[in-house]
Image: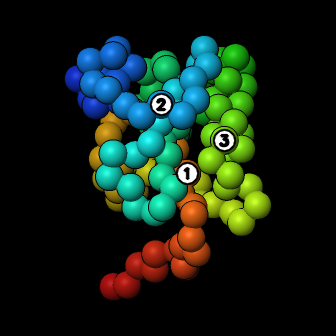
């Protein structure tokens, strides 16, 4: 499967769709989620075209890995998530619930988030 250049995050990176930017460096962009699931809900995306977390960690350059990690740490600090904690989520594929085929990390916080989802038969 090839990367879909028309996905919403690719369009945000090209400036075709606006976002509420939190942080940006050479390798990553972080912005507020348009449909937040918690009082604080940020997305961090690499600027390179990776479809999912597996592809990113298999193929990213050392600079991309470092820049992406730095972006996450900066967002945690900028949004004040460190003190009380946060949830960091990435979804991969159909069973993982991935909706946008561009690797991204959700950072959620600002209130107690409860237990993780449990799957029932």
Colouring of the image:
rainbow
Comparing labels 2 and 1, the label whose residue is closer to the camera: 2
Please tell me which residue lies in front, 57 or 88. Answer: 88
| Quadrant of the rendered image containing residue 69 | top right
Please tell me which residue lies in front, 86 or 65. Answer: 86
Distance between the alpha carbons at the discs numbered 3 and 1? 12 Å
Q: Is mark 1 on a helix, strand or loop?
A: strand
Comparing labels 3 and 1, the label whose residue is closer to the camera: 3
Q: Where is residue 73 in the image (x, y as percent from the top left)?
A: 71, 40
Distance between the alpha carbons at the discs numbered 3 and 2? 12 Å
Q: For label 1, count other residues whose C-alpha is less than 10 Å away and answer few (under 14), some (14-19) or many (20+).
A: many
- Please give left or right for residue 32 compared with residue 14 in the image: right
Tell me what residue is drawn at x 67 percent, y 24 percent.
67
Specify whether residue 2 is in view.
Answer: no
Q: For label 3, count other residues whose C-alpha is less than 10 Å away and answer few (under 14), some (14-19) or many (20+).
A: few
Which quarter shows the N terminus? top left
Q: What element carries label 2?
A: strand
- Please give left or right for residue 88 compared with residue 74 in the image: left
Tell me what residue is drawn at x 27 percent, y 25 percent.
17
Q: Which mark is residue 107?
A: 1
Distance between the alpha carbons at the discs numbered 2 and 1? 14 Å
Q: Provide the residue designation for mark 2.
A: 21
Q: For label 2, count other residues whose C-alpha is less than 10 Å away and answer few (under 14), some (14-19) or many (20+).
A: few
Tell me what residue is drawn at x 33 percent, y 85 percent.
121
Please tell me which residue lies in front, 74 or 87. Answer: 74
Give above or below for 105 relative to 9: below
Q: Provide the residue designation for mark 3.
A: 78
Q: First in sequence, mark 3 or 2: give its number.
A: 2
Label 1 near label 2: C-beta < 8 Å?
no
């Amino acid at each position: 499967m090839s990367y879909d250049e028309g996905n919403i995050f690719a369009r945000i990176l090209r400036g075709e769709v606006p976002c509420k930017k939190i942080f940006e460096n050479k390798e990553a962009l972080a912005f507020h989620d348009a449909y937040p699931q918690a009082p604080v809900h940020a997305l961090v995306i690499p600027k390179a075209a990776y479809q999912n977390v597996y592809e990113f960690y298999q193929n990213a350059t050392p600079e991309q890995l470092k820049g992406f990690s730095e972006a996450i740490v900066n967002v945690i600090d900028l949004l004040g998530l460190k003190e009380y904690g946060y949830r960091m989520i990435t979804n991969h594929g159909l069973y993982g619930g991935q909706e946008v085929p561009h690797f991204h990390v959700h950072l959620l916080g600002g209130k107690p988030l409860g237990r993780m989802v449990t799957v029932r038969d």
